[in-house]
Amino acid sequence: MKKLYILISLSFIFFLLAGCQSKTYEVSFEMNGATTEQIRSQKISSGRQALKPADPLKDGFVFEYWHEQDSDVAWDFETNSVNSSITLVAKWREIEADLPNGPKEPTETEEPKEPEGPSEPGKPEKPTIPEESLDPDQIYIDGTTTLYGPELWAIKDDFETTNIELDAEHLKVIDADELAVYQSKPISITSYQSLVMSWNVIDLDKEQLNFLVSIGKDNQFSRFFIMGSWKDGNNRSFSNQEDDFGKVNVDILTNKDVNNDLIIIKITINTFESDSAKIKNVSFTTKKDDNLVYDESLLVEKKIDVAPISQLDIPIIGNLICSPTSLTMVLNYYGNDLVVTDVAKKVQDQNNNIYGNWTLNASYAGGFGLDSRVEYISNFQQVIDYINEDIPVIMSIRSSSMDDLTGSIMAYPSGHLVVLIGFKLIEGKWYGIFNDPAEHDAAKVERFYEMSQVLNVFRNYTYILKTIKF
């Protein structure tokens, strides 16, 4: 009898425990044609809220919200509880319908502007602009080019640009309740193998800006390649974009036909009811070939006082953050007081989980009252000129062994970022003075690397930060 009582009691206790355990449900996400990577499903305890994922992207559409499969009502991640396994579907709103050969033509309800005169084959028509404005025919991309607000405005496509105005030399949203789109007319670009885009945005609040380009020739254009998505704490690149014209890998667009001599710039702004962000400029840097012109006779002894910061003493991510560490050194040189880990969070590429995306790093500096860009160097005189102007140069290098760069503490087969702060002649040989963040102690960051070796490991890509316009 006593054993029976114990068994009944234990069974009752197990029943109570089972009743107290919350069930776990799966929340999955249907991307509905998004160009971003598939979002992982979430395991959520009954009665709890799902975590809101990053907003996906889709060419030609703006993301609005997530909703259940059998409902068009937006799912509220702050208040809606999960009480069963569900699938949330991405809701999209179309912003344009691109033709197969490029940007869409005006519809019958749109009244096209009369061109001022006949255009050359493959050249854009002149937009109707005031006489005192910039001449759009004189706006083109050659090597490294930065286009500021007034220049972007002069080449805008009146049919495609909506809810955007030129305000005090910046492009700005007019109505915070509506999607904003800027699109340029086709502009000329000199022959190139690849390009990298960067931008400067100030007063960013809740907005998400997507920067895109379409490349081509004559009347044939590629898809719009997403060169980056810009949102505070949620910046992203998008690899695996490809068509017959080009291919994007992280921050580089490879041009498949060097005869492609036209480019269209597009920026979409999802406001999230905020209209404070201002687009100051966009920059393009193109690579024509692998040649680097170098004249040693132009070197002069000089050193810029940039406080050293080491990366390897930072826990967990220390071996991954050469780029934000180098960027922090230069930002602090210009009067800021930033911490490397904070900068790393801001420039992290959320899609690739990397900290060294050139576009995202260089663009971030534009929010500190500076003009900044990625710049491909084909003539080293440009680097020398920057140093002579007291402008530190963040350089991308790559080495296969420590012998490639005597004095470095390791090889960098995947690439590395360092800060060039000057030059020094030692026993008849020229050395570059670098702040190399790959150290455990800031006191050891300053290094002297022989210029003959520097030129061999230099990848020609740099971040340039200035206090004045390019």
Image (cartoon, rainbow, N blue to C red):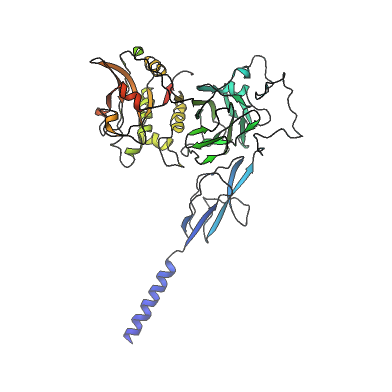
Q: Position of residue 320 (x, y in %)?
A: 35, 38
Outermost residue, left side:
427
What residue is shown at x 53% (from left), y 21% (from top)? 142
Residue 89 vertical placement versus 360 (above, below) = below
Looking at this view, is 171 or 31 the one in front? 31
Looking at this view, is 450 or 135 the one in front? 450
Position of 202 with respect to 104 (left or right) is left
| Count of numbered labels shown in the rendering | 0
Position of 253 with respect to 311 (left or right) is right
Residue 153 vertical placement versus 389 (above, below) = below
Looking at this view, is 10 or 168 the one in front? 168
Q: Position of residue 361 (x, y in %)?
A: 43, 31
Q: Is residue 13 visible?
A: yes
Q: Is residue 208 visible?
A: no
What residue is shown at x 48% (from left), y 50% (from top)? 51
Q: Quadrant of residue 458?
A: top left
Looking at this view, is 106 or 271 the one in front? 106
Position of 445 with respect to 225 (left or right) is left
Q: Quadrant of residue 423?
A: top left
Outermost residue, bottom side:
1
